[in-house]
Amino acid sequence: MAVGDIIAIPAMSAGYFQVQGRLAKTSGGDTLDIPAGMLNIGGNGFGYILSAATAWNPYLVANNDASFSIITLGDDIYVYAVQQASGVAKLVASKNATAPTGYSASNSRKIGGFHVGRTRPIANRFDAAFLPAIGIVPNSVWDLATRPKAAPEGMAEFVPGRWGSIYLLSPISGAWPSVVFGSRYNVSPVRSTGGYNELDLHRGVHAAGMREPTFEEWLMMADGAPQGLDAANDTAWSMTTNTGPCNTGFLQKSVSCANFVDCVGNLWERLNHHFDTTTGAYAWDATVVNTGQDAAQARGQVNHVAWRDAVAGGSWVEGLHAGARTLSLGAAAWAAGGNIGVRGVSDSL
C-alpha cells in the first residue's frame, strides 16, 4: 500500500451492517437489547459504530422522535441509527417507516423494529381464563440481519428462520390483480367473498413475499390458543350465533403461545394443501375455474373428481369445533362463501 491509497473500512461501504447477535426484547420489560456492531449510514464513506445497549427504552422521550409516546396495541415501531459527529450512531425510535422526524434517508438508517401486540406465555398454554397483556411481542423484534424476506410489519418468528403474520391478512395496497396483503391490527381481514374465491387469496399473499402455511407450520403458530365456545365469544370469535367475522385482534384471549392472533375461530385459514377426495372417473371441469376474480376470462379447466383443499382453525360459527388443532379437508378452492381467510408465512432473509 502506497501513501495516499484509499483505505476501505467495511462500515464505510454503502449498505454495510454487522452486529454481534441480534436485536431482542429485554427479558421482563418493554425494552430492547441492542448488540454492538458497525454500519453504514448515508452511502460510501459514512461508516459508524453501533454501541451495545441493554434495556434500551424506545418509549423514553430522549430515545424517540415524538411520533409516539405510549405502548399502543397494533403499533409497528422502527429503530433507526442516525449520524453523529462522534462517529458513534445514535438510536432513535419512530413510527415513521422512512425516516425519523427531523432526519432523512441520507442521515438515518432503519436497522430494526418490533410490533406491539398481545402475548401468551407457555405457562398459560390453553388457559381460557388468562388475559394476554399488551407489550412488545418478543418474537416480532427484527433487525437487518434477522428478519423475514417479506415486510416485517406485523410478523413474528414462530420457529428459527420462519416468520408468520401475527394477524389474518388484509389488503394493504393495490387492486386486483396487483393487490398486496399485509398483517395489520383492527382491520377487516380479506376473505373468500367480494370478488374473491378461496384460491384467489393466494395472489395477495405471494405478492407480499409470503406463502400459505403447511398444516404443521400452522400448528406451531396456533399452539396454546384456547378452544372456541358455542355460546360466547370469550376465547375465540366462534359463537354459533355469530353472523360474520370480527376485525383482526378484536378478542383479547384469542392469542397463541407463539403470539399469533385469531388462529382459532373468526375465519377458516387456507393451507397450502390441494388433493382429490375420491377415486371416481376424472373429467375436465370449467365450472371450478370460472369463479372469483377474472371469472369471465377463459383460463382453461381442471381435470378432477372432487378437488379439495385444507383449511384450519374454524370460522365465526364453529363453536367448540374451533381450536388449535382444528382441520377441515372439505374446502373447495373455487367457493366464494366468505368464511375462508389466509395467514402468511415467510422464510428469513
Image (spheres, rainbow, N blue to C red):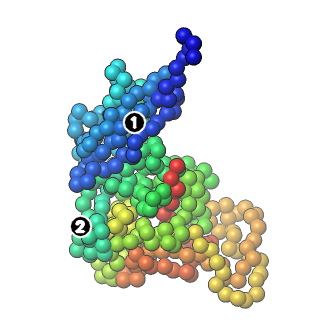
Q: Which of these two is toward me, 318 or 106?
A: 106
Residue 242 visible within the image: no
Q: Which quadrant of the structure image shows residue 326?
A: bottom left
Crowd around label 2: few <14 · some 14–19 · many ≥20 (10 Å): some
**What residue did someone put label 2 on?**
131
Comparing marks 1 and 2, which lies closer to the viewer? 1
Task: State the image coordinates of residue 171 (x, y, percent, origin top left).
Answer: 50, 54
**What residue did someone put label 1 on?**
37
The type of residue carrying mark 1 is Gly
- In this rendering, would 78 be left or right of 182? left
Crowd around label 1: few <14 · some 14–19 · many ≥20 (10 Å): some
Q: Quadrant of the N terminus?
A: top right
| Residue found at the very far bottom of the displayed protein | 280
Instruction: Give the mark nearest the N terminus, 1 or 2.
Output: 1
- In this rendering, would 217 be left or right of 275? left
Mark 1 and mark 2: Cα distance apart in space: 38 Å
Q: Which of these two is toward me, 108 or 312?
A: 108
Which residue shows up at 28% across the image and 65% down it?
A: 121
Which residue shows up at 24% across the image and 60% down it?
A: 133
Q: Which of these two is toward me, 47 or 346?
A: 47
Q: Secondary structure at mark 2?
A: loop
Can you say whether 122 is above or below 99 in the image? below
Q: Which quadrant of the structure image shows residue 86?
A: top left
- In this rendering, would 61 be left or right of 40? left
Which residue shows up at 40% across the image and 42% down it?
A: 20
Task: State the image coordinates of residue 235 (x, y, percent, origin top left).
Answer: 30, 73
